[in-house]
Image (spheres, rainbow, N blue to C red):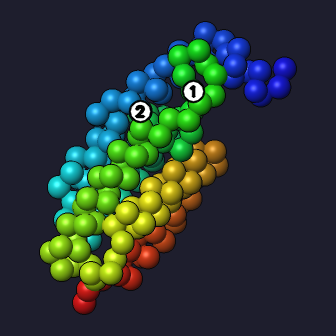
């Protein structure tokens, strides 16, 4: 049985896991589980660094088996267990990041030519890719490096 068949005819355990992942991804609390509480009030690079630390801590706990983190990197299933895309969590996260970056630009912390949508997309990509690598290698350094590089890029747009 190929991997496509596995997802399209998933066992009840696969379906249950997908249902739980989908419910988490679609819920407003998903953004909170990914540091959304900080993102909603994000208006400085310092706030963004605190968000990064919170996300790293949540993923570290998940890798150690202490808690779970919504999987924005691979949330891709529906109630039947078949593979579909699940952009809700990533788009919510990206929108929160973009709004915060826009506030940083408005308050003069970032240059006026900083593109909030593009920078948010890059941060989201770093989170998704770093999260996937951290989970598959069980090495949080993968996520730390991805987020640190993305934040470094964002800092290069500082106004001062």
Q: Position of residue 43 (x, y in %)?
A: 19, 65
C-alpha separation, residue under disc 2 versus residue under disc 1: 11 Å
Residue located farthest toward the right when viewing the structure as drawn: 1
Q: Earlier in the sequence, mark 2 or mark 1?
A: 2
Q: Which residue is mark 1?
A: 77
User: For the residue carrying disc 1, how many other residues have a C-alpha within 10 Å: few (<14), some (14-19), or many (20+)?
Assistant: many
Horizontal side of 113 relative to 128 (left or right) equals left
Q: Position of residue 156 (x, y in %)?
A: 38, 82
Residue ID at (40%, 67%):
119
Q: Is any atom of residue 7 visible in this view?
A: yes
Looking at the image, which is closer to me, 91 or 12?
91
Q: Position of residue 92 (x, y in %)?
A: 35, 45
Looking at the image, which is closer to me, 127 or 106?
106
Give the answer, above or below, for where 3 lies relative to 102: above
Label 1 sits on a secondary structure element that is: loop
Q: Is any atom of residue 144 visible in this view?
A: no
Horizontal side of 39 relative to 61 (left or right) equals left
Residue located farthest toward the bottom when viewing the structure as drawn: 160
The image quadrant where one finds the C terminus is bottom left
Label 2 sits on a secondary structure element that is: helix
Give the answer, above or below, for where 10 lies relative to 133: above
Looking at the image, which is closer to me, 134 or 119?
119
Residue located farthest toward the top when viewing the structure as drawn: 12
Using the rendered view, name the quadrant where residue 33 is placed: top left
State how many labels appear.
2
Q: Position of residue 1 (x, y in %)?
A: 84, 20
Using the rendered view, name the quadrant where residue 78 is placed: top right
Horizontal side of 104 relative to 148 (left or right) equals left
Residue ID at (56%, 54%):
129
User: For the residue carrying disc 2, how many other residues have a C-alpha within 10 Å: few (<14), some (14-19), or many (20+)?
Assistant: many
Residue ID at (45%, 56%):
124
Q: Which mark is residue 25?
A: 2
């Amino acid at each position: 049985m190929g991997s496509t068949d596995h997802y399209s005819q998933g066992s009840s355990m696969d379906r249950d896991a997908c249902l739980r992942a989908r419910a988490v991804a679609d819920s407003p609390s998903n953004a909170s589980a990914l540091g959304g509480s900080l993102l909603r009030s994000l208006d400085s690079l310092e706030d963004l660094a605190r968000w990064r630390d919170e996300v790293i801590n949540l993923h570290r706990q998940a890798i150690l088996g202490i808690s779970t983190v919504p999987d924005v990197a691979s949330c891709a299933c529906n109630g039947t267990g078949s593979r579909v895309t699940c952009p809700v969590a990533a788009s919510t996260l990206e929108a929160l990041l973009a709004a915060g970056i826009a506030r940083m630009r408005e308050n003069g912390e970032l240059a006026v030519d900083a593109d909030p949508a593009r920078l948010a997309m890059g941060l989201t990509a770093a989170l998704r890719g770093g999260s996937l690598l951290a989970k598959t290698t069980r090495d949080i350094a993968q996520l730390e490096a991805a987020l640190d590089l993305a934040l470094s890029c964002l800092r290069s747009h500082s106004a001062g």
